């Protein structure tokens, strides 16, 4: 049987949005996510502590209400349909929102003052964020702040699924402009980093020479790696073959400090107090500075008071929305 989104809208009542809000339950979303994770009805039913027939009926009711199949039943396995993938994306957002609600209510019951979940690219994490977080905590000492450091592409997935309130990063593909608002902060120069007594520190190396050494780099999808690969291509130099990929700044610095490994890191990381004197910057220019990074938030969502205060600490009260 073939269904389409248009068919679904014809099947559902004219005021389908209202019907969906009053009929669909969080329990339905939990079942769909459990099915996606296990791809097995029996396992999903066990996770919800219900019988398999009850879980099968619940899924049948959901699909009947929406008017479109969400999973394909195969022997011993279930696979989400295109419509199922779409519904699952929203289901995960809803469940993440619910988890955040429970956490914040628990914090309030215990006398806390809310929670702020942030993600940041490595260049901003050691420089800009400590000052802003310290300022926010100075007048909200019991505020719970969590900070995740990663590349922009990975952080924006967590932002879309509501695991984060904001990301200090940048767009990694044009389609993200439809999902997130962007408040620019500053450009991010990058540097080729080595230990101070690395053999390459004795002269002025060329790109063709440095690629022969081992490297620790961000994954290919990250803007920093894209900048590096573009610079190599423009110079007609092949990519290094001996590469470890990680988004961890600490792991990268440790490898650089203890081996002959080179890395491409935000210049701000190398200039911070904790790293001064432990690393050398090779006299190489790798492309232009990465484009402005800034505060990314979900498009169209009003900022909570905590986030507004935090951004005011970053950019000044007059620039915060």
Image (cartoon, rainbow, N blue to C red):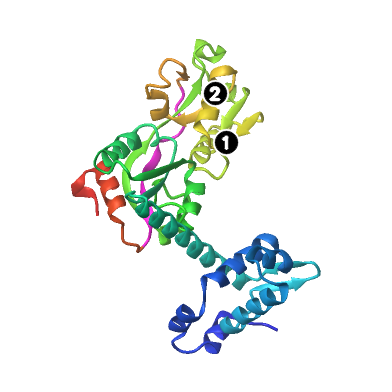
Mark 2 and mark 1 lie on one chain; the one further toward the N terminus is 1
In this rendered view, identify the residue nearer to me: 193 or 57: 57
Is residue 20 located in the magenta-colored stretch of the structure? no
Q: Furthest-front residue in view?
A: 110
Q: Secondary structure at mark 1?
A: loop
- Residue 224, horizontal then vertical, whole percent: 49, 38
Corner quadrant of residue 120: top left
Q: Secondary structure at mark 2?
A: helix
In this rendered view, identify the residue nearer to me: 232 or 192: 192
Point out which mark residue 317 bears. none
- Decide: few, some or many residues near mark 1? Use Cα within 10 Å; few <14, some 14-19, many ≥20: some
In the image, the segment drawn in magenta is: 284-299
Instruction: Write the residue at 25% across / 42% down.
Output: 313
Point out which mark residue 246 bears. 1
Residue 143 in view: yes
Q: Furthest-left residue in view?
A: 318
Instruction: Write the residue at 63% across / 23% down.
Output: 212
In this rendered view, identify the residue nearer to me: 178 or 126: 126
- Residue 300, horizontal then vertical, whole percent: 35, 64
Can you say whether 20 is above or below 307 in the image? below
Can you say whether 79 is above or below 147 in the image? below
Instruction: Write the residue at 67% across / 79% down.
Output: 57
User: Is the N terminus in the top left, top right, bottom left or bottom right quadrant?
Assistant: bottom right
- Residue 147, horizontal then vertical, whole percent: 42, 42
Q: Is residue 176 left or right of residue 70?
A: left
Q: Is residue 78 left or right of residue 294?
A: right
User: Which residue has dot 2 on it?
Assistant: 254
- Residue 168, horizontal then vertical, whole percent: 39, 44
Residue 239 in view: no
Is residue 291 located in the magenta-colored stretch of the structure? yes
- Decide: few, some or many residues near mark 2? Use Cα within 10 Å; few <14, some 14-19, many ≥20: few
Corner quadrant of residue 293: top left
């Amino acid at each position: 049987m073939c269904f389409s989104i248009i068919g679904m809208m014809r099947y559902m009542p004219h005021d389908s949005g209202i019907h969906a809000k009053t009929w669909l339950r969080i329990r339905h979303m939990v079942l769909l996510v459990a099915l996606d994770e296990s791809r097995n009805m029996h396992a999903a039913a066990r996770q919800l502590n219900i019988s398999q027939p009850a879980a099968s009926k619940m899924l049948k009711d959901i699909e009947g209400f929406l008017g479109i199949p969400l999973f394909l039943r195969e022997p011993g396995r279930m696979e989400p349909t295109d419509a199922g993938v779409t519904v699952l994306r929203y289901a995960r957002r809803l469940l993440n929102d619910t988890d955040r609600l429970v956490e914040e209510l628990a914090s309030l019951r215990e006398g806390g003052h809310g929670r702020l979940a942030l993600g940041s690219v490595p260049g901003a994490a050691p420089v800009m964020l400590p000052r802003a977080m310290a300022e926010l905590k100075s007048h909200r000492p019991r505020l719970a702040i969590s900070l995740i450091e990663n590349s922009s592409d990975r952080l924006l997935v967590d932002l879309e699924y509501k695991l984060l309130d904001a990301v200090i990063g940048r767009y990694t593909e044009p389609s993200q402009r439809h999902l997130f608002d962007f408040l620019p902060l500053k450009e991010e120069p990058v540097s080729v980093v080595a230990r101070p007594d690395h053999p390459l520190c004795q002269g002025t190396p060329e790109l063709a020479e440095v690629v022969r050494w081992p490297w620790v780099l961000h994954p290919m999808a990250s803007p920093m790696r894209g900048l590096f690969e573009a610079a190599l291509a423009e110079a007609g130099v092949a990519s290094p073959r001996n590469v470890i990929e990680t988004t961890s700044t600490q792991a990268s610095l440790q490898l650089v400090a203890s081996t002959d490994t080179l890395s491409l890191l935000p210049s701000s990381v190398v200039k911070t107090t904790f790293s001064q004197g432990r690393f050398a910057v090779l006299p190489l220019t790798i492309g232009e500075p990465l484009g402005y990074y800034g505060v990314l938030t979900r498009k169209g969502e009003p900022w909570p008071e905590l986030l507004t205060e935090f951004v005011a600490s970053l950019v000044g009260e007059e620039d915060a929305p």
